[in-house]
Image (tube, rainbow, N blue to C red):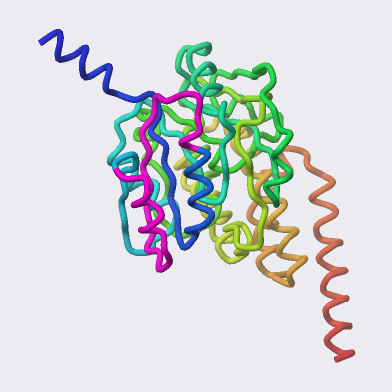
Amino acid sequence: MGDDLVSAAMSTPLFSVVIPTYNRAELLRTTLESVFSQCCRDYEVIVVDDGSSDATTQVVAAYGARICYLRQHHQGPGAARNLALASTHGRYAAFLDSDDLWFPWSLQVYAEVIQANAEPAFVAGKPRRFSSSEELINVQRVSTVTESFRDYLASAEQWRWWSVSSFVIRLDAIRSAGGFTSSPVNGEDADLALKLGIAPGFVQVLAPDTFAYREHPGSAVSDLEKTIAGTWLQVSSERANDYPGGINRALERWRIATRHIRPVSFECLKRGRFSDGWALYCATFRWHLRLFRMKYLLAFPLLLLVSLVFADGLGKAQ
């Protein structure tokens, strides 16, 4: 019996690498190569095909048994990651989108951070933005620098956002939080982070770079409709008291949430979605007022007015 328990513990990987993908066969191939180039080998890889119609199946098949391949009808990345989480065996889920990359040291850095911080619930890595592979040639590993907090909400004083490809989360914590929303929205990762708000232990990696965030026209964040829907998910969840921490930690949640909401409201103005931007402004007015974000509260209505006048003038000119 004792030998069986030791054997089971030894066969449990530290990381379950979760990669959702949708019609990104060639990018996925590069992403997988970055995973299988890791110095740390203590991981399993789960790819969830979210209903692709390209050569994704063939790309994954080339790796054989090294990948657990799951497939579903197109439901969005949140649902895809949840499907993977139901099949994971690792102690931590390490998320990587199929258009992003890891550096050879990424998992090793995460493993060291986890050990040094008594297995925190949530670790967030550091991005290096890129649009072409040449930009990554000179990236090197440097000494590891981190900042630790009792939980994610306690980190609210600064902007700490890097996309889901920065997330390394203990499996029991993410399951207790209910996983990702299955709604097909952008910002499902921001929603999950708030649901993890009081899970013990949050660590931000300040150095080295741990993942490469690819900037390209086909990225999910370019879909404003889904971004607006994901922003409203945060607003409605906060209003419904779905996020942990209660009234005592409301200001921390608002500080985090409004950092996501403000850029979206301005993007609405930029793209002529004036009513959507105004609705977000009104819905979060009290939060911003309590946080004393007076610059935003005063500037947004003025920018909206200017945008409306400009749009009206442009319409008449046409």
- Find residue 138 and report its image quarter: top right
Q: Residue at x 63, y 25 (%)?
A: 205
Q: Position of residue 20 (x, y in %)?
A: 43, 50
Q: Residue at x 31, y 56 (%)?
A: 71
Q: Position of residue 166 (x, y in %)?
A: 56, 36
Image position of 34 (left or right of 63):
right
- Find residue 184 and report its image quarter: bottom left
Q: Is residue 273 visible?
A: yes
Q: Is residue 248 visible?
A: no
Q: Residue at x 82, y 74 (%)?
A: 308
Q: Is residue 212 shown above or below 156?
A: below
Image position of 261 (left or right of 19):
right
Q: Position of residue 276 (x, y in %)?
A: 65, 66
Q: Residue furthest left?
A: 1
Question: The N terminus lies in which quarter of the figure?
Answer: top left
User: Does residue 49 show up magenta in the picture?
Assistant: yes
Image position of 316 (left or right of 213):
right
Q: Is residue 234 shown above or below 102?
A: below
Q: Position of residue 189 (x, y in %)?
A: 52, 44
Q: Residue at x 60, y 64 (%)?
A: 223
Which of 289 and 200 lies nearest the eye of the viewer? Answer: 200
The span picked out in magenta is 35-64
Q: Residue furthest front?
A: 62
User: Does residue 187 show up magenta in the picture?
Assistant: no
